[in-house]
Image (tube, rainbow, N blue to C red):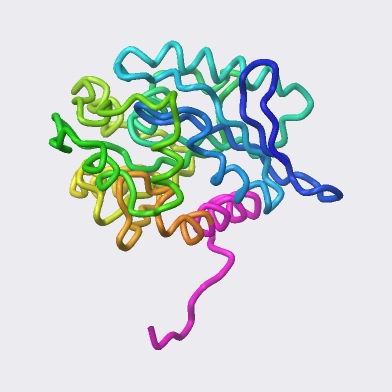
Amino acid sequence: MSTVTASGYLDFTEPAGLKPRGTLLVLPGRGESASTYSRFGSRISADSYRVRVLENVTGSSPDAALDPVQAALATAVADLGDDLIRPLVLVGSDAAAAVLLAAVGDADPQAAWWPDALVLAALPGYGEHEIGDQWESELDVRTHCPVHRGVLSNDELLDRQSISAAVADELLDQAYKSRAELPQLLLVGDADPLADRAALAGLARALPAARLSVVRGGHHDVLNDLQHRSVAAEIVSFLEALRDSTPLVPLVRVESSAW
C-alpha cells in the first residue's frame, strides 16, 4: 500500500498480515520527483520491506546537497519513530548516489540516520554529458521502458535536461574516494552513457564490502528501466543477505548452469 504522508513522503508498506523486514529511504536523482519511484516502491514493498521516498533535495546542484541531504535523512528517520525497522538501507540514484557516498564519508556513524547499507544506482561520471535538446533524446538516455517513459513524460515536477549538467568534481571526488565499511550494492546499466564504468569498477574494488552489478541493456534510470524486475530481485537478494549474515554471503549460489 502506498500513501503520501503529511510531511510529503511517498511511503510503501508491507502487505497486510506480514511482518516488515527492513526500511529503505530513497533519494531521487537530478530532476526527478518522488513519484518517479512509485513502481520501485511498490515492487520492493511487496517483499515486506518498507520504502519511504523523500522529496528531491539534491536538485540541479548536488554539490551543495550534503548538508540538506543529511538533514532530510535525519528528519525522515525521526518521523518514522517506532515504525523504523532495521536494517535501514539508503537508496540513491544518479547524483543522489554520489551524495550518499560522500555523506557516509563525511558524517558521524553515530548519526541517527546512519544506515546499515547503501544501494547506489547509476552513479554519474565526471563532466557534462551531451543528451540532445529534444525530450525524446533525454528519454533514450534515461530508459527504454515504455511505462517509465510515460511516467517521466507526464510528471510535471520533472526538471528536464538537468542530467546533462556536470556534477561538481569535488563531490564526485568525495564519492569515488569513499571507503565506507558499509555493505554496498552498486548498480549500473551497461548502456548508461552517463556512467564511468572504469571508475565504478575501481570504486567497487576499493570499498571493503561492495558488490557491483551490471544490468545488461540497462540505461541511466536503471531502477526503472526494462529490467526493473531483475534489478528489484537483485536488491531484494542483497537485502536478504544483509539480514542473514555479516559479512554478507549470498543466499543462493549457482553450482551448475548451462547459461
Residue 156's place in the image compared with 93, above or below, is above
Is residue 246 covered in magenta?
A: yes
Residue 64's place in the image compared with 117, above or below, is above
Furthest toward the bottom, the residue is 258
Q: Residue at x 83, y 47 (%)?
A: 16
Q: Residue at x 41, y 40 (%)?
A: 120
Pick the residue in front: 249 or 227. Answer: 227
258 relative to 7 in the view: left or right: left
* Residue 82, x across and y down, in percent: 79, 26
178 relative to 230 in the view: left or right: left
* Residue 140, x across and y down, in percent: 26, 47
Q: From which residue to which does the magenta span run?
A: 233-259
* Residue 121, x across and y down, in percent: 39, 43
Quadrant occupied by the C terminus: bottom left
Pick the residue in front: 148 or 252. Answer: 148
35 relative to 139 in the view: left or right: right
Quadrant occupied by the N terminus: top right
Q: Residue at x 26, y 56 (%)?
A: 190
Q: Which quadrant holds residue 84? A: top right
Furthest toward the right, the residue is 17
39 relative to 46 in the view: left or right: left
* Residue 212, x across and y down, in percent: 36, 53
Is residue 214 covered in magenta?
A: no
Q: Residue at x 39, y 37 (%)?
A: 153
Residue 200's place in the image compared with 126, above or below, is below
